[in-house]
Amino acid sequence: MNIPSTIAIDGPAASGKSTLAIALAEFLGYLYFDTGVMYRAVTLEAIKSGKTTPGEELCVALAERLVIDVQPPSKEDGRFCDVLVNGADVTLEIRTPQVDANVSVVSAYAGVRKALTKQQRRIGLKGKVVMVGRDIGTVVLPEAELKIYLDATVEERARRRFVERQAEGDSLNSKKVLQAMSKRDQIDSTRQIAPLQPAQDALIVNSDDMTAEQVFTFVKNQIEKNAAHPAN
Ligand code: CDP
């Protein structure tokens, strides 16, 4: 069987990338690696240093200096991994609305991308990995053997994010979630370096009318079909 060893999953916020990647990684026995946590960790540390709008120089220095680790979960609070920054657990802190609001600005800085892409590529090239982000198939691992671009309308994605955060106990306004998501989409897809876009050879999946399980089954079937008939 010719099963892809490196799988890249890209797409906009809340399109279901992480859910799909976790299921695929479990099914194949691969490492699940969400590159978004690295951009979030740099953003969190910049905010903690007291800057309301984190500047480029500070963020680049943090991206080059911080030791960001992803490890198996140490707690049963719904997390799929622990995110550590210089040894401290920031798994929950990197998901706050304040980090959401600043992460796209921080991840558009060239020096931040250069430092984090280097680390991501080193991990990805080891193989047996499902890597998630915005630029995995286009920049981080253009040689990935399977590239998936998972999409959905901004309204559907904002609805999912609202439900997800509500379940975590956050009191949010659905209109504000939609506005924040549209803004993040706009910055991510129009930035000069590594903008969010499907790789030319990506399998594009629109998940608007699909459950998470249907998306997983569709991708799993594609993998099995290609493995059985590699020439197709
Ligand atoms: O979970 P969600 O889809 O909301 O976001 P995420 O995957 O945690 O990524 C947060 C932000 O990091 C994105 O909006 C991008 O601005 C940035 N990012 C990026 O630029 N490149 C990546 N490979 C991953 C994330």
Image: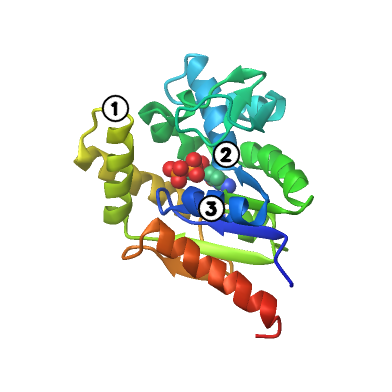
Q: Nearer the viewer, residue 200 or 19?
A: 19
Identify residue for label 3. 23
Q: Amino acid at mark 3?
A: Ala
Which quadrant of the rendered structure holds the N terminus? bottom right
Residue 116 to residue 69: above or below: below
Q: Position of residue 135 (x, y in %)?
A: 59, 54
Q: CA distance from mark 2 to mark 3?
A: 31 Å
Please report whichever mark, 2 or 1, sits nearer to the chain's N-terminal start.
Answer: 2
Residue in view at x 69 percent, y 61 percent: 142
How many residues crowd mark 1 within 10 Å: few (<14), some (14–19), many (20+)?
Answer: few
Residue 23 to residue 148: above or below: above
The answer to which image quadrant residue 45 occupies is top right
Q: Amino acid at mark 1?
A: Gly
Please report whichever mark, 2 or 3, sits nearer to the chain's N-terminal start.
Answer: 3
Identify residue for label 2. 109
Residue in view at x 54 percent, y 22 percent: 90
Mark linked to residue 169 = 1
Q: Amino acid at mark 2?
A: Tyr
Q: Position of residue 78 (x, y in %)?
A: 45, 33
**Foreground label between 2 and 1:** 1
